[in-house]
């Protein structure tokens, strides 16, 4: 079985631009969450989607948005990029409680 | 709000020895889950071990075990017979419900402990 897959693996963007990150969950997993991990810190919760509905949102500005598709894959969008948005963005999927399975992340660099 | 504290930014251990990583957390909830995740340089967050708060018995997974002290809100990870492949960043994480009903949960992570296993 394929694990959680994220694309792209690396990305360089300019301040003010917009970016879309993609995530495919493990087959059968209906819950997808997004986390931001700044260098030297633990991951911070951004969003959770379950059955295509937003079920939770962390303390992030409205520039961050996400959606989940009928096949349970997900996209994270960030508008008006700031230097501080440079981070590793992790996607995780889960079927139910018991812990999430994480992807390898997308490394976003804003210059 | 829940907080997770890992007081050891870095630790090192000799191969084949035992090491214990510390974690404390703060919550007013009674039902929750605790995890230890490992993040090697490959970046992928790998689940090491999981503990359910309502279970008194400490979880064990091969060389990895925890010491869960619910009253003290402490959740330490013991790695026995350390191996070079254990070198990684280790994160303690707390999981609570986002809302009542449904299987929707949020993870709160500590800042991590960088463990180096020396040959």
Image (tube, coloured by chain):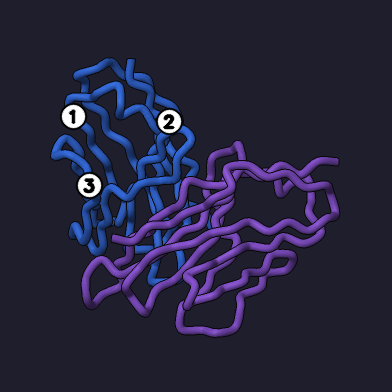
Chain colours: A blue, B purple
Q: In this view, does B99 lie to the left or right of B50?
A: left
Image position of B23 with respect to A87: above or below = below
Q: Are marks 2 and 1 on the same chain?
A: yes
Q: Could you tell me which chain the residue with mark 2 belongs to?
A: A
**Residue pointed to by mark 1:** A79
| Image point (45%, 40%), residue name | A41
Q: Quadrant of residue B118?
A: top right
Specify whether A92 is left or right of B37.
left
- Which image quarter holds the N terminus of chain B? bottom left
| Mark-to-mark CA distance, 2 and 1 | 16 Å
Q: Using the image, name the chain to which the residue with label 3 belongs.
A: A
* CB within 8 Å, label 2 to label 1: no
Q: Position of residue A48 (x, y in %)?
A: 27, 56
| Earlier sequence position, callout 3 versus callout 2 | 3
The secondary structure type at the circle numbered 1 is loop
Q: Where is residue A85 in the image (x, y as percent from the top left)?
A: 30, 29
Q: Position of residue A32 (x, y in %)?
A: 33, 56
Residue shown at the point (85%, 54%) measured from the top left: B16
Q: What element carries label 3?
A: loop
Mark 2 or 1, nearer chain start: 1
- Residue behind mark 2: A107
Give whichever of discs 1 and 3 has the lower sequence position: 3
Q: Which of B21 and A101 is in front in this view?
A: B21
Q: Tell me the residue that label 3 is attached to.
A: A59
Q: Cα distance, mark 1 to mark 3?
A: 16 Å
């Amino acid at each position: 079985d394929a694990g959680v897959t994220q694309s792209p693996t690396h990305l360089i963007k300019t301040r003010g631009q917009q970016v879309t990150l993609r995530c495919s969950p493990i087959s059968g997993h209906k819950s997808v969450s997004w986390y931001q991990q700044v260098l030297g810190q633990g991951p911070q919760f951004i969003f959770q989607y379950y059955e295509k509905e937003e079920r939770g949102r962390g303390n992030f500005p409205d520039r961050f948005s996400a959606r989940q598709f009928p096949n349970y894959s997900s996209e994270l969008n960030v508008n008006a990029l700031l230097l501080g948005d440079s981070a590793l963005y992790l996607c995780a999927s889960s079927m139910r409680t018991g812990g999430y399975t994480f992807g390898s992340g997308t490394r976003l660099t804003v210059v | 709000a829940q907080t997770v504290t890992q007081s050891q930014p870095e630790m090192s251990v000799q191969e084949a020895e035992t090491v214990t990583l510390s974690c404390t957390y703060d919550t007013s909830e009674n039902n929750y889950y605790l995890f230890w995740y490992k993040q090697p340089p490959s970046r992928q967050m790998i689940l090491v071990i999981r503990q359910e708060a309502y279970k008194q018995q400490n979880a064990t997974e091969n060389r990895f075990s925890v010491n869960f002290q619910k009253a003290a809100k402490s959740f330490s990870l013991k790695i026995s017979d350390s191996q070079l492949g254990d070198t990684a960043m280790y994160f303690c994480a707390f999981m609570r419900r986002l809302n009542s009903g449904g299987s929707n949960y949020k993870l709160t992570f500590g800042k991590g402990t960088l463990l180096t296993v020396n040959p």
